[in-house]
Image (cartoon, rainbow, N blue to C red):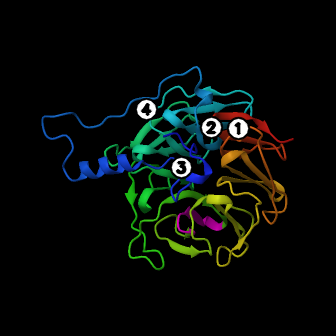
Amino acid sequence: MNPMLAPEERTAAVPAWAPSRRSILLAGALACGLGPRHGQAAELAATPAARSAIATQAAVLGMAWAGPRAVAVGDHGIVLLSDDQGARWRQAAAVPVSTLLTSVHFADADHGWAVGHGGAILATTDGGEHWQVQRLALGEDRPLFSVYFFNAQEGVAVGLWSLTLTTQDGGKTWHEQHLPNPPGSTKADANLMRLFAGEAGRLYVAAERGLVLKSVDRGASWSYLSTDFKGSFWCGVALDGDTLLAGGIRGALYRSDDGGRQWQRIPLESTASVTALAAAAGGRVLALGLDGLQAESDDAGRHFAPHARPDRLSLTAALPVPGAPGRWLLGSRAGVLPVAGG
């Protein structure tokens, strides 16, 4: 299933890029030894992303800056690059998987990582032109939803059922971190949807069940920040100081100005699920969502002015354009879009 394609009334706790029930059952069968046995079909293998004349129309789920270069990732293992602030896009030279990629992050202009379905973690050392597999677990069907690197060595990736991986060697090795149980729960199995970084090395995760997770030791340990929200958060962003924003299903948008100890719901005047949050200089914040939702704030997220695209196209990712206040690069279920704003 392509991401963000479900209509609002079908929105569930896990967004549409999560595995289907059928795929989860298949993964369970494989884990129980019901998959291919010795002498039968070979182990699942990755298929490189195909070159496509319409690659820019593939659904985009993640975007990042690699120095002056914009990088977008999404469906079918597509990686797109732009060296002119989004005016033109081209496909990366080599991507070793064709599964859905959900997130991308760069530590500098050269070193970047992307994650996605099949538990894939990909790495690049040339600004996104060529990618190599660092981790792949196709038989698990336990996707990774987000990745963040503090520098070229230390990074974190998170995904389905509280899967949390850390590395201290640039991704040569990844180690699973076992999270504490959320308050009122007997098991740490909340889906971890989006990593976002704050000041002083703090790292956060927007998660389901109205949870936001916090780490102060680069992902080695985590605590839970509770909100009054009971649904799923799909995204978050940290602003200057201790200000945090988290957005999710059915127009949920919450703000904290004390590092997550207390939260206030911000009226959005929309029931469209919030899929992405991005911040720019001067307290500017952009919230994107399903059904063409775009909402902008110029006061650090205290108030938003929402409007919907006439075509109701679901929007999935945003990047502020450096040196161009109010201009954003946008990703959608229909690919990368022309630069928005003025």
Residue at the extreme top of the image, as rendered: 53
Marks 3/2: CA distance?
A: 17 Å
Q: Which mark is residue 96?
A: 4
Q: Name the residue beneath numbered marker 3.
A: 152
Query: In the image, which is nearer the foreground, mark 3 or mark 2?
Result: 2
Query: Is residue 61 shown above or below 218?
Result: above
Q: Earlier in the sequence, mark 2 or mark 4?
A: 2
Query: In the image, which is nearer the foreground, mark 4 or mark 1?
Result: 4
The kind of residue tagged 3 is Ala
Query: In the image, which is nearer the foreground, mark 1 or mark 2?
Result: 2
Where does the magenta region start and end? 200-211
User: Could you say whether the residue bearing mark 4 is in a helix, strand or loop?
Assistant: loop
Residue 210 painted magenta: yes
Residue at the extreme front of the image, as rendered: 9
Q: Name the residue beneath numbered marker 2.
A: 71
Q: Nearer the viewer, residue 131 or 10?
A: 10
Marks 1/3: CA distance?
A: 17 Å
Left or right of 125 on screen, residue 41: left
Query: Is residue 129 shown above or below 176?
Result: above
The kind of residue tagged 1 is Pro
The kind of residue tagged 4 is Pro
Q: Earlier in the sequence, mark 4 or mark 3?
A: 4
Q: Earlier in the sequence, mark 1 or mark 3?
A: 1
Would you call the spot at circle 2 few (<14 residues within 10 Å), some (14-19), or many (20 or more)?
A: many
Q: Name the residue beneath numbered marker 1.
A: 68
User: Could you say whether the residue bearing mark 1 is in a helix, strand or loop?
Assistant: loop
Q: Quadrant of residue 335?
A: top right
Q: Are marks 4 and 3 in contact (CB under 8 Å)?
A: no
User: Could you say whether the residue bearing mark 3 is in a helix, strand or loop?
Assistant: loop
